[in-house]
Amino acid sequence: MPRGGLHLAEGGGVTSSPYGAVGLAQLGAVALGGALTAYGLPSPGLWVFAWFGLVPLIVAANAAPTVCRAALCGFAAGFAYHAVAAHWIYATCRFAQVPAVVSALAVVALAAVLGAGWAAVAALARLASESAPRGARPLVWAAAWTAVASFEALWTPRVGMDLLAYTQWSNLALLQAGSWGGPHLLDFTLVLFNAALAGVWRDERDDADIPALAAAFLLAAGAWAHGAAVLAARPESRGPVGRVEILQPRVDQYHKWSETWLSEILAGYDELLSRPRPAAPLLVVWPETSIPRWTDRAEPVPEAARWAVKLGAQNLVGIIASPANASGAESGPANAVQLIAPDGRLDGRYAKRQLVPFGEFVPLRRFVPRFVIDRWLMILDNLGDLEAGAARQPLLQTAWGPTAVTICYEAIFPRWPRLDAARGARLMINITNDAWYLDTWGPRQHYRINRFRAIENRLTVIRSGNNGISAVIDPWGVTTAELALNERGRLDAEVPLQDAFPGRSFYTRHGDWLGASCLVFVLLAVLAVILKDSLVSPI
């Protein structure tokens, strides 16, 4: 297949279209497929679109006369997908008093950055397919997608919707495959099915397409059957339980950092914790940045310490750690957590490892002109750059054993929970403040990904959000307790003390083996094409 600008059309003629075989109508179909795929995400949950939404992209990219034009198809689909999936960021920016034009540009910029990943997939798949038999093209597409998604997960901005697997959040049986290959195994399955379907969709069908579609169907069916069997074996009772109280105070985001509201905010926590309870808890979980003031990370928060003593229970509370503690031993402000013992002592601490761009730090702040900030980005003046915590911090110790913490945005990255689970964590606690996202897709996307983290590592996830959604999710991904979005309250839940999966999962033990394998496979396929071309003498 030629890689130049002009190409032979199917009648033998030469087309002069600036898009080659990829016309505007076809780009529109590709973008529509990407946009529909995004509707599988929370909260629409139209998961079926993800099983055929990529077909227009794959058909167009396979037929593209050049790698660049295949990449154009990938970008169109990826941009449309992420623009739909992240449209709620516009509302978030407007809530933060960012001008409408800048808010819209933020969505466009994010969709373009993440859409570039889809462009890379299409280019790699198109190039690697040149050395592969037609029947193997679906495998090439699935491998290329998984390789790029795995690589991107290490560095690009995430917003809780960029992995294709997240479109299947409501298919609990299918999600069980995550314990073997993480979210990328489901990505692989979805793309394999789409690519096989694309093969039989084209006019010039041949027998090679049928086995590929059958294999894709069997992989998907096998994953579902395995998951159904795992769920059927889930025990109804898991032995002794410990009580957990999860606070959801619903603090107004505009009041949160105002000194005039500090007393009222703290009184709100007292009211929640003063409500009647049938039995004392073992652990009380407060949401992210519960205490809206600078806190010395080495000294227990008085408000939480008082309740820890009163209840005789550990309290895990979100704080903003001051730039230096009393001894000056630590510097740098941090989004952090304190674990306070039943006697009021500090029992452990954790600082957030993965910071939010333009939320907790401003990338390349020094290069943003002053007049731009004054006119369009006033919010940047209110954003202090926080300091990220170390990748490996001591696990906290609770009644459930070694306990890991993710703060807000960190739950989006599969590698952090997997790293902590591999180090011995038996419980995961995610604290967050999603009030910025209002009543949009955002908080629901952010909440549902915790189901993936629970299944991938076979451990319980406890989640506390300022305005929700707070919940307990068991190692099978089943939500056992939940407090709805924007509901103020205290969620009292029982969490089994016995570890249902002491060996954790295959994914926990072996990491992203699938992503690494696919990356090697795609690189070798591309290398084969390059070597083949270099050995072919020009006519």
Image (cartoon, rainbow, N blue to C red):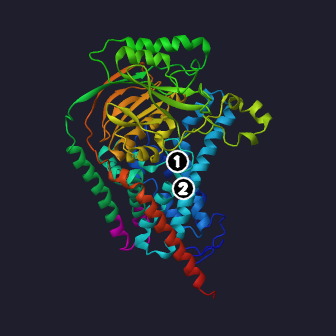
**Residue bearing the label numbered 1:** 81
Query: Could you tell me how far apart the alpha carbons at marks 1 and 2 are, in whole angstroms?
Result: 10 Å
- As displayed, is residue 534 above or below residue 502? below
Judging from the image, what secondary structure is the residue with disc 1 in?
Answer: helix
Residue 75 visible to an observer of this rendering: yes
Task: Say few, some or many: other residues with alpha carbon within 10 Å of mark 2 (under 14 / 14 to 19 / 20 or more).
Answer: many
Amino acid identity at mark 1: Tyr
**Residue bearing the label numbered 2:** 118
- Between residues 460 and 473, which one lies in front from this camera angle? 460
Residue 166 visible to an observer of this rendering: no
**Discs 1, 2 touching: Cβ within 8 Å:** yes
Q: Is residue 98 magenta?
A: no
Q: Position of residue 250 (x, y in %)?
A: 47, 20
- Between residues 209 and 379, which one lies in front from this camera angle? 379
- Between residues 531 and 59, which one lies in front from this camera angle? 531
Q: Residue furthest front?
A: 327
Task: Say few, some or many: other residues with alpha carbon within 10 Å of mark 1 (under 14 / 14 to 19 / 20 or more).
Answer: many
Q: Position of residue 17 (x, y in %)?
A: 65, 66
Pick the quarter of the image with the C terminus: bottom right
Q: Position of residue 459 (x, y in %)?
A: 33, 41
- As displayed, is residue 536 above or below residue 84? below
Amino acid identity at mark 2: Trp
Write the start and end of the magenta stretch as one range: 197-213
Pick the quarter of the image with the N terminus: bottom right
Q: Is residue 203 magenta?
A: yes
The quarter of the displayed image where residue 314 is located: top left
* Residue at the image position 41 percent from the left and 22 percent from the top: 247
